[in-house]
Amino acid sequence: MKLGVCYYPEHWPRERWVQDAQAMQKIGIEYVRIGEFSWSTIEAEPEVFNWRWLDESLAVLHEHGLKVILGTPTATPPKWLVDKHPSMLAKDEQGRVRGFGSRRHYTFASLEYREECRRMVTMMAERYGQHPAIVSWQTDNEFGCHDTILSYGDADLRAFRFWLAEKYQNIDALNKAWGNVFWSMDYRSFDEVELPNLTVTEANPSHRLDFQRCCSDQVVAYNRLQVDILRQYASGRDLVHNYMGFFTAFDHHKVGEDLDVASWDTYPLGFLDQEDIYTATEKHEYLRTGHPDFGAFHHDLYRGCGKGRLWIMEQQPGPVNWAPHNPSPADGAVRLWTWEAFSHGAEMVSYFRWRQAPFAQEQMHAGLLRPNGEYAEAAAEAEQVATEVKRLASELGVDVDALVSLPSAGSVALMFDYDACWSLDIQPQSKAYRYLFWCYRMYEALRELGLSVDIISSKAEFDHYQMLVLPAQSYVSPELTSRLESYKGVLLVGPRSGSKTESYQIPENLPPGPLAKLLPLTVERVDALPEHMPLHVNGLWGEGMLKHWHEQFKTELPVLLQDSTGDPVLVGSGQRYYLGSCVDNKVLKASLSRLAEKANLAPYFLPKGIRIRQRGDLIFAFNYSSIPQIFRPTKALPLIGGAKLASCGVAVWKKEQEKNKK
Amino acid sequence: MKLGVCYYPEHWPRERWVQDAQAMQKIGIEYVRIGEFSWSTIEAEPEVFNWRWLDESLAVLHEHGLKVILGTPTATPPKWLVDKHPSMLAKDEQGRVRGFGSRRHYTFASLEYREECRRMVTMMAERYGQHPAIVSWQTDNEFGCHDTILSYGDADLRAFRFWLAEKYQNIDALNKAWGNVFWSMDYRSFDEVELPNLTVTEANPSHRLDFQRCCSDQVVAYNRLQVDILRQYASGRDLVHNYMGFFTAFDHHKVGEDLDVASWDTYPLGFLDQEDIYTATEKHEYLRTGHPDFGAFHHDLYRGCGKGRLWIMEQQPGPVNWAPHNPSPADGAVRLWTWEAFSHGAEMVSYFRWRQAPFAQEQMHAGLLRPNGEYAEAAAEAEQVATEVKRLASELGVDVDALVSLPSAGSVALMFDYDACWSLDIQPQSKAYRYLFWCYRMYEALRELGLSVDIISSKAEFDHYQMLVLPAQSYVSPELTSRLESYKGVLLVGPRSGSKTESYQIPENLPPGPLAKLLPLTVERVDALPEHMPLHVNGLWGEGMLKHWHEQFKTELPVLLQDSTGDPVLVGSGQRYYLGSCVDNKVLKASLSRLAEKANLAPYFLPKGIRIRQRGDLIFAFNYSSIPQIFRPTKALPLIGGAKLASCGVAVWKKEQEKNKK
Amino acid sequence: MKLGVCYYPEHWPRERWVQDAQAMQKIGIEYVRIGEFSWSTIEAEPEVFNWRWLDESLAVLHEHGLKVILGTPTATPPKWLVDKHPSMLAKDEQGRVRGFGSRRHYTFASLEYREECRRMVTMMAERYGQHPAIVSWQTDNEFGCHDTILSYGDADLRAFRFWLAEKYQNIDALNKAWGNVFWSMDYRSFDEVELPNLTVTEANPSHRLDFQRCCSDQVVAYNRLQVDILRQYASGRDLVHNYMGFFTAFDHHKVGEDLDVASWDTYPLGFLDQEDIYTATEKHEYLRTGHPDFGAFHHDLYRGCGKGRLWIMEQQPGPVNWAPHNPSPADGAVRLWTWEAFSHGAEMVSYFRWRQAPFAQEQMHAGLLRPNGEYAEAAAEAEQVATEVKRLASELGVDVDALVSLPSAGSVALMFDYDACWSLDIQPQSKAYRYLFWCYRMYEALRELGLSVDIISSKAEFDHYQMLVLPAQSYVSPELTSRLESYKGVLLVGPRSGSKTESYQIPENLPPGPLAKLLPLTVERVDALPEHMPLHVNGLWGEGMLKHWHEQFKTELPVLLQDSTGDPVLVGSGQRYYLGSCVDNKVLKASLSRLAEKANLAPYFLPKGIRIRQRGDLIFAFNYSSIPQIFRPTKALPLIGGAKLASCGVAVWKKEQEKNKK
């Protein structure tokens, strides 16, 4: 449970560096990320290098005991480099070149640009690979930001054809997999395949899905190129990338396999304001704290991508500049967010940024310091956290460094699969359906029941979880099918699961395809509804509404919930259940609490805005609402805070019971 | 009153064909449309033909007594052909090429592509022109689908300049007709004229109108090219094209002149969800049946385009995939739609599609069979209709085949003119004004009064109708003026009629231009209102609201309705009436019922959601509402169903009176 | 107080010209603007000139005593000219060429097109510079209409690089000013700089601001080129350009410096319907009169741009054609608008257009005559105004011509700065924030208090005003700072003032930057709020709500209004006040009335929809509401109308008091 900060020595006069380092130390900051946008400072002219500012700033930070995460500066290649390789620029879906003048002006598929990255990263890694200040390297910055995963230029087309040829080997296999006979879309060779943009009407969904997969694989390859160099020169250092919120355009599990830690950039207010996932009521209610599950969802998701290791690389410290509206956080919100991250296993929370820059695009983005160098509001909250962490260690009788190794796993697993996300969003049938939204709402319901959730990939082990939820696993591989068949915990399978083959076709036996053995039922028809037509759901397990997606399926399984015509909505018995509709929060909580009880978990209906998380013996409690609330866990002693949680309040409890037993 | 289905033998293993044909027979299907997307199966490589699958599938269908409608496959040219003629691709209004990867990737104006079509259609027609299974040929598929009428490429520019030169002969005539002096837009030659897209602000409306006319004429020429070949080789077969719902971008009357039958593709739920014409209330209320006038309006419109002959080429049988939301139809809706079509004179209703394809773009589009080959919900409803048709024939004591020749004409004519549509929508003055919407609402009001309506072109005879409605005939030709002047029935002329010359200028005597002799009045000013400002209408004939379009005109004619300032809204006497505003349903029904009475028709205010239609002695009644309702015609005997109509209920009655008299 | 009209002799047969001139005389019209779209009539072929129509129409007008404003026809170059110089066309932000076919098809930066303008204007000026009928020349027409200030073509890029080189001299200065180090955006030379469009995410705001300034300067240069020629040949004539409503994309103050008079084109109904500035309630309430401050705001703004001289070049006379909805004006509205203009110092009000054209884009745009040549509604209202003006002169015992020289200055100055507008709108922080909207709402509040306002540039003198309002002066130059420091009147500084340097950076001492000496406070943080989250404001000076922009600042100044957390919103004492939030109309009126009292003005809370304006002894009163209202100034005698103002009513009063004193 360490604090960090993002710092740009190249923006400030050298005379200030020592003062900054001292102030970081004073606040309790131990980690500093630098360098990730500095290419033009390092190499202002081709092959003319200026390392001095970096040598010296590293020295200053090191002298003050600060540990550095060094970013490769490949998200912002300089103008001269772009002019040298104009083909490295991405093209948008409309065919327009996305030019120089901001950042991320490259396509992952450009081999020319990959060579330039190899050159720069090698230079940096040779020079700083074993620098004593540096404990970690960040590859590039926020892959995909500003919608940069899908690109429609020549480099992308070349990469796609190559990727297809690798996958299908012969063009007839592709034609068959995509069902190209449908509209005479058959190709005679891979060289005839085009990108799926600017077609007269929608391109074949199989075509679109394969293109998304290909683009995702370009990110994996691009990242691996940097990783391979860094492994060679910077051994012993943690390799990391900083992911983003609500971003699904590449497979983070695959990128994560090549790295040591997953980190992400968390902006609770910016995302609340910006994202369609939130209702108008939520946007109003949580304006100054962010939605109670925003941070948690991503912490649990990315911890999974990081094979258990999680950092927060950028934590919002005040108003940002990039959302449609940029309000100030509530007093205490920065502390709340930081503790929430720790409760989900974050080893480190780093604020973005140290000092608000008075120039360029982000000049209205707050930092721990104001543009004039004085402390901004968040500095005190960060300092408070640093103090509290020490207190917590002392209460627990352990060294502060030991806190990192507290257990972080949950008892319920929710499967999140990037391939399923792409597949289902390509054809939502009801405009409002989004895979991510549905997963988020399932997660929210679990968390409102006080459960600690792990979000896992479709490749991850799940045997040890007491309960497993598949929100919408569209393609279920034979390997996954077999693991599910032998799973002993309580399993809930959600709508659209098993609805597609790997090639995006409807399975021969109809959905849920390979899951039909496990859950004997057949989805015969889908009633895809507009927002204005929710349907009533009721039955043994409760009542409420269903929205957007409603499967009409036949089954002999016991019916636990049904629609108003008597058609089944939730069925199952023993350890295995199938939910055929997107149901509302009320139904979700009622159903999931039943299932959690079957799994011997202890679901608890938390007060509005209150969330908890467990790490071993510790229970963390948080109040995201704007009024004080009470939460007191049974048989537990408060270490920080207590039962009464003010708005933005945080409490940490230790279970008595466990203590007694051990 | 026959049933048909759309079938794609090329999608399924040959072993299945016989089973499919048998199942069709069993349901009562007699017609099968095939072939319209099969170019790449026929000619996978240039000039290498595979006719075998088509020979054999025709043979199977023929053996089972099924009659085939064979589609020319020109809506989906294969990739190699597009690569050979890249200039055949359309360009959208933004200048982007609309590429390969879905369907309809060509512009009608491409002479290269027309040559390819000539080649393919000739090959097919030579081979199958006299095939005993084939009773009809469909040209291409859904002209204009995916907004493909207007194209802005080089081929289109060339065609437009040629078209203009033909029409105007010399450039001064064009300059004068368009009023190009207005903003120094004069041209010195036809080669200076550009397409009306990407101008700094809106192009000259005369320019836009002529471009629309030219593009429409390209469709006519494209269709005629195929027709000419088919007439040569496939004599005795009905030539047909399948039109679409709410689609006005080309002149269907002109295309229809070259064909034997008009058909259209009816998707009541998809269009309800998708189209702006419907209010939020309507979208909610008729979610599972479609709007009560959707089918009827198009049946009557296209029967007019088909010179009295109408088929339904594609009838929605379940949820579709292409609307923003795709709900399931109500139980009975497929039967309801089928009978509604028959009541409007459809000779044949063909479901789209036989079996839901498990692959490609439309994999979520239901068929009569599910993807796994089992019957879907609609199969039973189709079978029920087939049985009921037989029963009806038997009740009437005629052969089933004789039902086709029942009279289908209505007693009221409503004029629908594609040229008027283009003209008025180019400058709506009030954003919400749409010609089509206004015609539809007039039609709806007539039909809610129980009247049977024919929708006729501006060239059609109308002397024999008791009542004639011109919703908004912007340009009234001398020929039409003279026919209107000698018309003896009750005439209602709606707002914007006579408001433009052929060249899109305001007539010298102001609107209604040439109609001023018939209806002595002068439109002095137009009050084009936003949605939030409807005005009250009242007077001798009722009261209600007017919206969007409100003409301020002076006249000596008796005032039947006026606005709140006393200005006239509806005027006239004897047989001739003028309505100057877009009025609401309440006013429309009140006024049209008065006029119908004057025309010796018997208007009847039907219950909400109930619609009726007459064919000679027969009265068909339909319940589109979600509750049971009562409708009992006077002096009539029920043949199918009765007075109590459940939701989706259908009844057929025979007039007693007529029986007695004859 | 003269009337004029816009006339297009080239649209009508020559036989009609005399009749038109006579009718103009009869109505009381004295000024006629002609020629501004006539290039293709003058020069139908390159270098082949037809001056005859212009010679003769000038002669006709002159013979009837009409004074001509001749427009240079450069807003509509003919097709042949565009074909000769394709590079003269603008490109939109998406990179698409904006082609021929309407008007304004050129970019201001095109040197080729400037040469063509020089040629044409010289020809015209040589011929007509000293023509006795001509009293004024209008340059081009509506600079910037149809979003034509920013253009992204090669000519624009060349001009921008040149402009930057001029401004910064060396590239390091530019890099520093823009803060290009931020994302490695540094350039090595001016030739590396690109236009700020089609970047991956937003371009640097400094980059964007400089581009906007450069484009504005192109307009200045383009206009000056014409002015220089006209000064040479047409000495003694007023040079004028016609500006537009709610249009801020170039610096009108700078263009105005080169001209003699400012004029603008006022369409109260079109702008009400079209502009986001107005609420749904306002759009409904003022549908037929326009918003009560629309005309006034622009009159006061452009009188400032015209160095005290103001004309209305185009006054809406009936429904227009270009707004989403185009309703008819209320009876009396045209008279109301005309008198409102006179009350703000307009020397002349010219109606657009004389006769409604029956052809081309604006055929639905009303004129004083209908398309058939008969009088439209507005003709009588214009005639009434002409009569009333004579009566007013007679009541005042002066010659009609003397009315022009009545004083027109107000007592309160509101600073409006185009550079501030661009700067603040580039980064609004809260989507709904717009500089123009905020200035308009401040102006509205002042005017609802019965105050007469001058809208001044940041360069204008303000010492003589009793009160000065800076709504949001983002960059405050040293020169302005010093003048503000020595200002003796009551000063109100609004939110975001002093928030940026000239280069768009945050000032070193934080906002309000250089104003901190005058108003000792520091803006520490900005709470940029969505529409759904207004905050309550209360305190000594009243209560109400704040919206969108809320500064959190620290100060020792007395707090007059605060938010619900006690943070200051309005502070100050004596003559100097700072407002840190965008507050609602209620708070604005309460605060501004207090300040006006301190400034020894006599604020008066007018009835809803009533507005007044003073010119010396005269008080003009107007009723924009739809119901009759009472307004009686103290100690004044009615000259026209009286205390009871019908809807659209106008009254002119003369102060008694003043009379007695003199």
Image: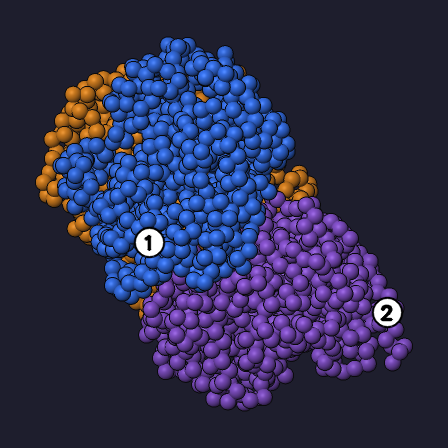
Chain colours: A orange, B purple, C blue
Q: Quadrant of the C terminus of chain C?
A: top left
Q: Nearer the viewer, mark 2 or mark 1?
A: 1
A498 displayed left or right of A186 = right
Mark 2 touching mark 1, by CB under 8 A?
A: no
- Residue C596: horizontal and vertical position, in percent? 45, 17
Read off the chain for label 2: B
The residue sitting at the right extreme is B660
> Count the marks: how many?
2
Read off the chain for label 1: C
Q: CA distance from mark 2 to mark 1?
A: 74 Å
- Residue C313: horizontal and vertical position, in percent? 41, 44
* Above-or-below relation of A121 to B113: above
Residue that numbered label 2 is attached to = B636
Q: Quadrant of the N terminus of chain C?
A: top left
Q: Residues within 10 Å of mark 2 (few under 14, many from 20)?
A: some
Which label number is shown at residue C73? 1
Q: Residues within 10 Å of mark 1 (few under 14, many from 20)?
A: many
Q: Is residue A120 visible?
A: no
- Which residue appears at 37% of the width and 64% of the height? B186
Type of the residue with mark 2: Ala
- Residue C159: horizontal and vertical position, in percent? 21, 46
